[in-house]
Image (spheres, rainbow, N blue to C red):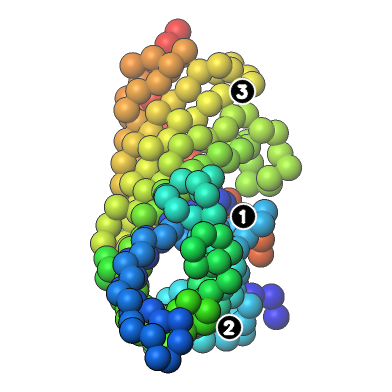
Amino acid sequence: MARKTPALPTQIFLLFLLKILIPSTTSINDSPQLTNMVVYVQDKTSPPNATEVPVAGIAGNLWSFTSFGTIYVIDDDLTTTVDRNSPQVGFLRGIYIASALDGSSVYVSLSMLFTNGFFSGSTLELQGTSVLASQLREVAVVSGTGKFRFARGYATFETVFVDTADDNITTTIDRNSDMIDHAHGIYVASTLDVSGVYVAMSILFTCGDHKGSTIELQGSSVFEMEFREVAMVSGTGKFRFAEGYATRQTTFVDQVMVMGQRLNITRCKIKS
């Protein structure tokens, strides 16, 4: 049976800020050294080159972080800053398991492998329960290798989520139908309870009567709503001074994390 995948934007980049406090030792007899560390995990959940993928789950159920029994494997880059192009210091590899029946948390077992810098060749082992609705999600540092042998401490994950959008807009639900424009912009997870995202999007028309014009959309998108309404705040070309609203409806999500949405533009003033 084909698995179901969650309704998510086509490209999702999750940036996690880790704050780690570890007594690290190089041997049993050495005195512990207290180490504070901040690194960023560059996590991508959709093709191409996804670094986090669901590999198992209950047949017929949605495979997601809130669906009991779903198992994810990850292989994310560790960088020095939030910029994904900043220097890489290692990898974060391991598993997430949706082990809470109510979907409130996941079990994590992760290994941080350092490949550059002072800790190159060493690892840190993380384990614990990550509560999804928490702004800071704390797990234990249970051990390590190399310069982190016998390490103990804790790590906190903080999501610094920015999702860039660059989607094709077509005339029908068929992705192979005529393309009329692109949707460029960002999704920002700005709610602590993960109930929605802030949307700032520009629709650029590339053919037809409105070629070269844009429509600017802005607002909050609540995940659980079938129709997600945002404001039309302005535009360019034939949509100068445009006002109105747009509703988005998810029409399909395929197995490679591509989502189809129906976008309805309403009460839009068009320049004659």
Q: Which residue is mark 2?
A: 57
In the picture, measured across the screen, residue 251 lies left or right of residue 194, that is right
Compare residues 211 and 92 and report the one nearer the observer: 92
Tell me where residue 29 sits by quadrant: bottom left
Q: From what the image shows, is residue 163 above or below residue 177? A: below
Dot 3: within a 10 Å radius of its alpha carbon, few (fewer than 14), some, or many (20 or more) residues?
some
Dot 2: within a 10 Å radius of its alpha carbon, few (fewer than 14), some, or many (20 or more) residues?
many
Can you see residue 175? yes
Label 2 vs 1, first from the N-terminus: 2
> Which residue is painted at 33% across and 46% down in the image?
198
Label 2 vs 3, first from the N-terminus: 2
Residue that extends furthest to the bottom in the rendered view of this protein: 28
> Which residue is painted at 45% across and 8% down in the image?
272
> Which residue is painted at 50% across and 35% down in the image?
184
Dot 1: within a 10 Å radius of its alpha carbon, few (fewer than 14), some, or many (20 or more) residues?
some
Identified by mark 3, the residue type is Thr
Compare residues 269 and 119 and report the one nearer the observer: 119
Compare residues 252 and 74 and report the one nearer the observer: 74
Q: Which residue is mark 3?
A: 206
Element at label 1: loop
Q: Which residue is mark 1?
A: 258
Identified by mark 1, the residue type is Val
Label 3 vs 1, first from the N-terminus: 3
Question: Distance between the Cα atoms at labels 2 and 1?
Answer: 20 Å
Tell me where residue 108 sits by quadrant: bottom left
Residue that extends furthest to the top in the rendered view of this protein: 272
Quadrant that contains the N terminus: bottom right
